[in-house]
Image: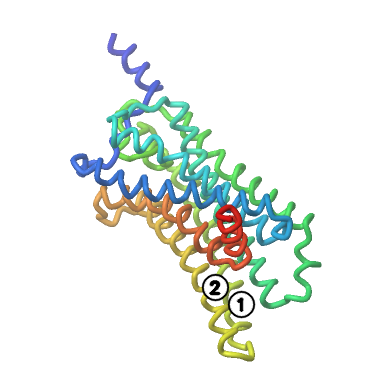
Amino acid sequence: MSDSNTTDFTNPSTFILLGIPGLEAAHVWISIPFCTMYTIAILGNFTILFIVKMEPSLHGPMYYFLCMLAVTDLVLSTSILPKTLSIFWFNSREIDFSACLTQMYFIHCFSAMESGILVAMALDRYVAICHPLRHSTILTNPVVAKVCLAVVLRSGMLVLPYVLLARQWPYCRTNIIPHTHCQHMAVVKLACADTRISSYYGLSVVFSVLGLDVFFIAVSYTQILRAIFSLPTKDARLKTFGTCGSHLCAILAFYIPGLFSSLTYRFDQNVTEHFHILMANMYLLVPPMLNPIIYGVKTKQIRDKLLHLFTHKGT
């Protein structure tokens, strides 16, 4: 009987997500800002997709990348929030083993995809500001399609081993995950086996993907800033610098919490568990909320089309 029970528990049919341990009494209150951010993200990103689709003049490289970012943000936020809210509101903590691994794949795949899109958008801004006359010849539609395909394939292939390795580990300690969602290391830490290969592989992906992406973004924006300071008029410098500054804020809002969440799971620096879990949620909810505002509403062409849409309906 004991052996049978151990064998059954080695491959659990379900995991139990605890939400935010230590803050259970505040789950309903925490759900309010989470739900607000998700609602803004859904409305904002769908609005971007609708406007770009309906307006032929926006069918260009920058807006194709923006649409891809919007789709990524929609999937990223939707992959965690419905389940998180069901924990907060209905105490629905069970998640099927396969559903947990699927959620893990979507979270990490689309996080890597978002990083790749941010690099592509930084490249687009670099070409537009530093080589404006060559922008249309460098970033043609076939080039944009190849960049998007490369971003998708890179993310999908690099994250797939996360799930394949997590599926093979025996889970004989517990099936309780002290988290709101199935983050890779939160699940792997439950395994009763030597899971260093999962940890090392995940760390190599963090440094090879996010590290390189941050490097390329930094190089692009360094060149952009040099070009900005060489502009002839102060107004032009301030306008361009303001746009790039808001872009950098959106980029930092994605990378800082993401790197913090990934590294503290491996190198515990006495960070309280509830703070770590909140940060893990922030990098999956804040960027999808901010990106439509920073890349969309603050972009003159989209703002003008949005205003035209509302004023036209009003008349």
Q: Amino acid at mark 2?
A: Cys
In which quarter of the view is residue 131 placed? bottom right
Q: Residues within 10 Å of mark 2 (few under 14, many from 20)?
A: some
In which quarter of the view is residue 157 placed? top right
Q: Nearer the viewer, residue 314 or 190?
A: 314
For the residue labelled by badge 1, is the local secondary structure a helix, a strand or a loop? helix
Establish if 15 lies above or below 134.
Answer: above
Q: Nearer the viewer, residue 246 or 14?
A: 246
Disc 1 target residue: 224
Q: Amino acid at mark 1?
A: Ile
- The location of residue 232, given as percent across then percent down, is 64, 91
- The location of residue 298, given as percent across then percent down, is 54, 66
Q: Nearer the viewer, residue 134 or 149?
A: 134
Q: Which mark is residue 244?
A: 2
Q: Which mark is residue 301?
A: none
Establish if 160 lies above or below 117.
Answer: above
